[in-house]
């Protein structure tokens, strides 16, 4: 593993960033930090590695952009299934996208989980391919360059500490592997807890229909964003449409004497 990374560092960066931006649950930030650190100790060409990271990110983003343009909300549901981030990542990205438009691609790159959701959203809302490509490439350059530069500074300091042992490259790769494993385990545990709590509070479609058919005083509050509604313009009969961000302002519109069912995806 160590020998492969040291010998094929640029290829490693490309494959790792590509996998991360596709949505595979591996954190890319440790790899970018290692990229800079290895460059600082002369084990890697920083310029080539940075270019590989940008190209890998751009290819992955373009794939998701095309899928978002053709598949819409189906893509978002898939992303929530394969991501280690809680399903709320989609909601947060939609809110950022509604506020900043295509510029949110740059912001989303620095937030784990959001960087994969933003490209299909751009496709869903009809952002032009050329404009998307420019913003996506700029975002990848800033994202990979920032973390790589931090790794470069850390690598220079680490070299001073480990020069006597002669195992700088091995130490960096070992630290990278440890950070990746710990990050994946922590995210997996968080997601399992989140989904367990969600299952406890969930009601199935069939159970909700039985509530309606039996005449129970149940009210459905539709919390979907404008992007969700545009992607799937269907509503549950009798549902009260209030975006989650408007709850504080419109809470008085919700009757207190009825059981509430929240619909948000």
Image (cartoon, grey):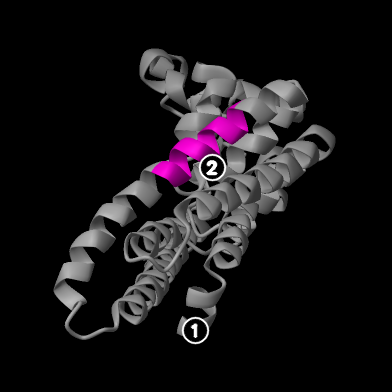
What residue sits 52% from the left and 55% below the top? 49
Residue 35 placement (x, y as % from top left):
43, 60
Helix, strand or loop at label 2? It is: helix
Q: For residue 141: magenta? A: yes
Label 2 Cα neighbours within 10 Å, binned few <14 / some 14-19 / many ≥20: many
Residue 82 placement (x, y as % from top left):
62, 60
Image mark count? 2
Residue 137 seen by the camera: yes
What residue sits 73% from the left and 40% below the top? 62
Dominant secondary structure of the residues highlighted in magenta in the image: helix
- Report the residue marked by disc 2: 115
- Report the residue marked by disc 1: 3
Label 1 Cα neighbours within 10 Å, binned few <14 / some 14-19 / many ≥20: few
Residue 1 seen by the camera: no
Q: Which of 95 and 149 is in front in this view?
A: 149
Q: For residue 113: magenta? A: no
Q: What stretch is highlighted in magenta?
A: 135-145
């Amino acid at each position: 593993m160590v020998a492969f990374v040291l010998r094929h560092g640029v290829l490693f960066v490309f494959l790792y960033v590509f996998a991360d931006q596709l949505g595979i649950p591996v954190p890319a930030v440790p790899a970018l930090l290692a990229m800079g650190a290895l460059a600082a100790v002369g084990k890697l060409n920083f310029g080539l590695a940075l270019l590989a990271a940008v190209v890998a990110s751009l290819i992955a983003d373009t794939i998701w952009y095309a899928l978002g343009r053709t598949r819409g909300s189906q893509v978002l549901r898939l992303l929530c299934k394969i991501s280690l981030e809680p399903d709320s990542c989609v909601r947060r990205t939609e809110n950022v996208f509604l506020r900043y438009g295509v510029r949110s691609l740059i912001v989303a790159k620095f937030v784990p989980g959001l960087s994969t959701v933003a490209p299909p959203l751009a496709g869903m809302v009809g952002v032009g391919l050329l404009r998307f490509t420019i913003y996506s490439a700029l975002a990848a350059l800033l994202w990979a360059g920032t973390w790589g530069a931090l790794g470069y500074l850390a690598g220079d300091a680490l070299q001073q500490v480990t020069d006597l042992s002669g195992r700088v490259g091995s130490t960096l790769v070992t630290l990278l592997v440890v950070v990746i494993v710990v990050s994946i385990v922590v995210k997996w545990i968080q997601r399992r807890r989140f989904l367990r709590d969600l299952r406890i509070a969930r009601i199935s479609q069939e159970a909700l229909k039985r509530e309606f058919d039996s005449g129970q005083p149940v009210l459905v509050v539709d919390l979907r964003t404008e992007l969700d509604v545009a992607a799937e313009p269907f509503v549950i009969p009798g549902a009260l449409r209030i975006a989650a961000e408007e709850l504080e302002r419109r809470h008085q519109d919700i009757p207190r004497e009825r059981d509430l069912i929240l619909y948000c995806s």
